[in-house]
Image (cartoon, rainbow, N blue to C red):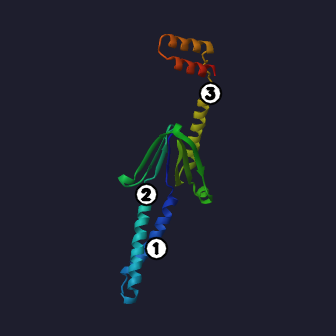
């Protein structure tokens, strides 16, 4: 099984609407005919605002396009970022994942996107989160299924008991080490007390 998740088309609507209804009209307003002095500050302010909104919206569209999650049954790959020093490329074995969550709001449910959150435990709990992702439910459920199977296998293998050496065998080995001169009187007494309990 191979599941790929990317940003939903709805993630692009806000930046596109900002460009169409705010950035472009502000830029066009600056270059419009007629240049009364009273509007000069307003026109320059709107031009600067339009350029900033245009830049940030185009950047958001490109960054959204670069987000991709891939799960192949064992490995989760998370990619995002545009510039080499800002790129993220994480490959993690699914056994490192503690929990995979998916949530949707009303619009996400109607349009078919959701939030994916992966929690993992590396000493401190870390998580990776992404909004407006397609196949969010599939990818989270497959990772959760893998986690359940992996935990079941670990618990069934941990139920196998290795027989512990008897107390007399341990004391005999300790005595042999003492007779051979490997350990001192003090080490012998400490180890003996530890074995006896």
Q: Nearer the viewer, residue 33 or 35?
A: 35
Callouts 2 and 1 close, C-beta under 8 Å = no
The residue labelled by disc 1 is 22
Q: Position of residue 29 (x, y in %)?
A: 40, 80
Is 60 located above or below residue 27 in the figure? above
Name the residue at 62% across, 30% down.
155
The residue labelled by disc 3 is 156
Q: Secondary structure at mark 1?
A: helix
Tell me how far mark 3 sits from mark 1, CA to CA: 61 Å
Toward which corner of the image does residue 61 lie, by quadrant?
bottom left
In front: mark 3 or mark 1?
Answer: 3
Q: Crowding at label 1, few (<14), some or many (≥20) Cα neighbours within 10 Å?
A: some
Horizontal placement of 149 versus 40: left or right?
right
Name the residue at 52% across, 60% down.
10
Query: Do we see residue 186 in this rendering?
Result: yes
Q: Position of residue 188 (x, y in %)?
A: 54, 17
Question: Sequence-wise, which precedes: disc 2 or disc 1?
Answer: 1
Question: Sequence-wise, which precedes: disc 3 or disc 2?
Answer: 2
The residue labelled by disc 2 is 63
Tell me the quadrant of the picture where the C terminus can be found.
Answer: top right
Q: Nearer the viewer, residue 106 or 167?
A: 167
Q: Crowding at label 2, few (<14), some or many (≥20) Cα neighbours within 10 Å?
A: some
Query: Do we see residue 166 in this rendering?
Result: no
């Amino acid at each position: 099984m191979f599941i790929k998740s990317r940003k939903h088309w709805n993630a692009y609507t806000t930046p596109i609407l900002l460009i169409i209804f705010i950035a472009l009209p502000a830029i066009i307003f600056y270059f419009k005919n007629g240049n009364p002095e009273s509007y000069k500050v307003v026109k320059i302010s709107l031009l600067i605002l339009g350029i900033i909104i245009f830049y940030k919206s185009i950047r958001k569209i490109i960054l959204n396009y670069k987000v991709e999650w891939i799960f192949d049954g064992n490995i989760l790959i998370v990619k995002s970022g545009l510039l080499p020093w800002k790129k993220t490329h994480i490959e993690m074995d699914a056994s490192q994942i503690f929990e995979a969550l998916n949530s949707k709001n009303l619009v996400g449910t109607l349009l078919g996107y959701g939030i994916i959150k992966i929690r993992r435990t590396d000493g401190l709990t870390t998580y990776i989160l992404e909004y407006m992702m397609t196949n969010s439910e599939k990818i989270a459920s497959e990772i959760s299924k893998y986690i359940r199977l992996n935990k079941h296998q670990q618990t069934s293998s941990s139920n196998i008991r290795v027989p512990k050496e008897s107390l007399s065998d341990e004391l005999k080995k300790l005595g042999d080490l003492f007779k051979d001169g490997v350990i001192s009187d003090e080490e012998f007494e400490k180890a003996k007390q530890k074995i006896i309990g």
